[in-house]
Image (cartoon, rainbow, N blue to C red):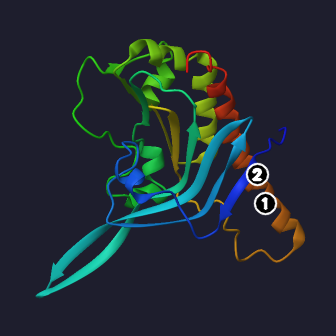
Amino acid sequence: MEQLEVDIEDYAPGKYINSDFVKNCSILPNYDRINGSDYISGKYKGVEITYCDLHLEREHRERENGRTTTTYRTNFKGPVILVDLGKEIEGYVRIKERKTPRKESNFLSDILSGAAEAIGIKTDDEIIEVENVEFNNQFEIKSNNHHMAFYILTPDFMEKIIETDAMAEGYTNLLFKKKRVVITINNGVDSFELNKTIYNKAQLEKSRQRVRDDLNRVLNMIDKILEKDQLF
């Protein structure tokens, strides 16, 4: 895979994106506690992008024998990527992955209300289906601009989403709204935290290459988005 490059302008290991943005992002779940790391901002092919690893948790209380125990359970952990399109788009297009038994059997089995769950009330005029049956089965597409939705969801772009999601082994969601695209991948991984059990340089390089490959797959998805700049 060809290695793609990001011109990094700011990197802050202990920082994450604005919490107000997280609260109002419809492809991220509600939370009671937030943390994050590896905030990166820069340019990719002349377009502003922002990246961070995000960790969201919900409070869970249990009462037994007159005592209340409070714990926190993860409902989102993974990368969040913002791509600035530079131009306002009309309406919104939201692509949310549906829950699947296979994914619920791994780390996501403990998620209370993860990013794969639909948010809000479904209305017939907002739900869209495409000709790709596999994509319809895996993702819910919601939009108030059908022309925009079908323009974005070309066969190549849908295949790129499916490919990226398969490699991420989590839930992949996208939101096209206003001047940006938001990509979230709920996979239970802190991307830049390398395994502490690595003992030699070969293992370290293998782990670093995995991080580069993960980012590369997201950048390839962004490439497909940037092909549509004449509409944006």
Left or right? Give the position of 64 relative to 183: left
Q: Give the quadrant of residue 167.
A: top right
Q: Give the quadrant of residue 65.
A: bottom left
Report x, y in % for residue 48: 64, 41
The quarter of the rendered structure image containing the N terminus is top right
* Front in this rendered view, residue 56 or 52: 52
Left or right? Give the position of 158 relative to 113: right
The residue carrying pointer 1 sits among few (fewer than 14), some (14 to 19) or many (20 or more) residues within 10 Å by Cα, namely some
Left or right? Give the position of 150 relative to 98: right
Q: Give the quadrant of residue 4.
A: top right
Q: Which residue is mark 2?
A: 212
- Residue lying at the far right in this picture: please name it: 201
The quarter of the rendered structure image containing the C terminus is top right
Report x, y in % for residue 143: 37, 23
Kind of residue indicated by mark 2: Arg
Vertical arrangement, residue 110 with respect to residue 97, above or below: below
Q: Which residue is mark 1?
A: 208
For label 1, the SS is: helix
User: Mark 2–mark 1 contact, CB under 8 Å?
Assistant: yes
Vertical arrangement, residue 196 with respect to residue 145, above or below: below
